[in-house]
């Protein structure tokens, strides 16, 4: 069961991290940040109501994690060619017993306000190193407009829907690959 949960958690971590690895170059060595630029970056995050947005996103992810972990664990059990019907039934029973504890632990981590503090503490300087103080002030001004406010209000829902689309696309591509790998392992 621990292997199943570890596999499910690894898949979530990789799916969630894949876009950042694909789109973001390795971080540059930490350089001194101009205090005015850092302050402008912090003001941008306040204008974006980033803390509330991150909290909402984490809550949405936390709510869906139980279903996703269960589905992943069940798929791992059902698709394991080394298990017979009785062993699969025993594995499902063990999963039913142990999975709620794993889910609670994952939800506890995702709903920890301290995690958002850490994310903000490490993200604000990224913006300060990437944008000038003037650029940050321009972005802040945009987010204080009605269109900027609408964008911010829509972002959590759009991100959640985008994540679902991403998971569906990944599942469509990985499903046939998993079947092929299982068939090859039987040979």
Image (cartoon, grey):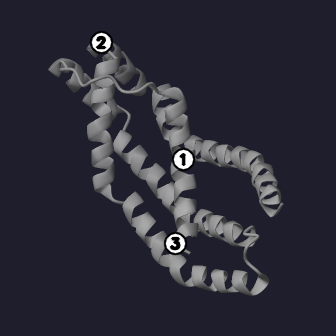
Q: Secondary structure at mark 3?
A: helix
Can residue 35 be seen here? yes
Mark carried by residue 66: none
Q: Quadrant of the C terminus?
A: bottom right
Q: Residue furthest front?
A: 187
* Rendering coords of residue 125 (x, y %): 27, 29
Task: Give me the residue at 66% from left, 86% from top.
Answer: 90
Q: Residues within 10 Å of mark 1 (few under 14, many from 20)?
A: few
Q: Earlier in the sequence, mark 1 or mark 2?
A: 1
Comparing labels 3 and 2, the label whose residue is closer to the camera: 3
Q: Secondary structure at mark 1?
A: helix
* Rendering coords of residue 45 (x, y %): 33, 33
Mark carried by residue 134: 2
- 81 relative to 22, above or below: below
Q: Residues within 10 Å of mark 2 (few under 14, many from 20)?
A: few
Mark carried by residue 2: 3
Q: Which residue is mark 1?
A: 14
Q: CA distance from mark 1 to mark 3?
A: 18 Å
């Amino acid at each position: 069961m621990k292997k199943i949960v570890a596999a499910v958690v690894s898949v979530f971590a990789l799916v969630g991290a894949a876009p950042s690895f694909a789109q973001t170059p390795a971080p540059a060595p930490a350089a001194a940040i101009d205090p005015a630029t850092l302050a402008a970056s912090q003001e941008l995050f306040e204008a974006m109501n980033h803390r509330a947005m991150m909290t909402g996103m984490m809550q949405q992810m936390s709510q869906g994690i139980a279903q996703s972990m269960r589905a992943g664990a069940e798929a791992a059990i059902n698709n394991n060619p080394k298990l017979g019907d009785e062993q699969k039934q025993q594995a499902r029973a063990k999963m039913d017993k142990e999975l709620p504890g794993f889910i609670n632990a994952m939800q506890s981590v995702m709903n920890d306000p301290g995690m958002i503090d850490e994310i903000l503490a490490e993200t604000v300087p990224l913006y300060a190193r990437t944008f000038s103080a003037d650029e940050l002030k321009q972005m802040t001004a945009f987010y204080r407009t009605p269109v900027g406010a609408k964008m911010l209000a829509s972002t959590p829902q759009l991100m959640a829907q985008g994540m679902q689309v991403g998971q569906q696309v990944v599942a469509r591509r990985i499903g046939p690959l998993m079947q092929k790998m299982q068939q090859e392992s039987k040979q």
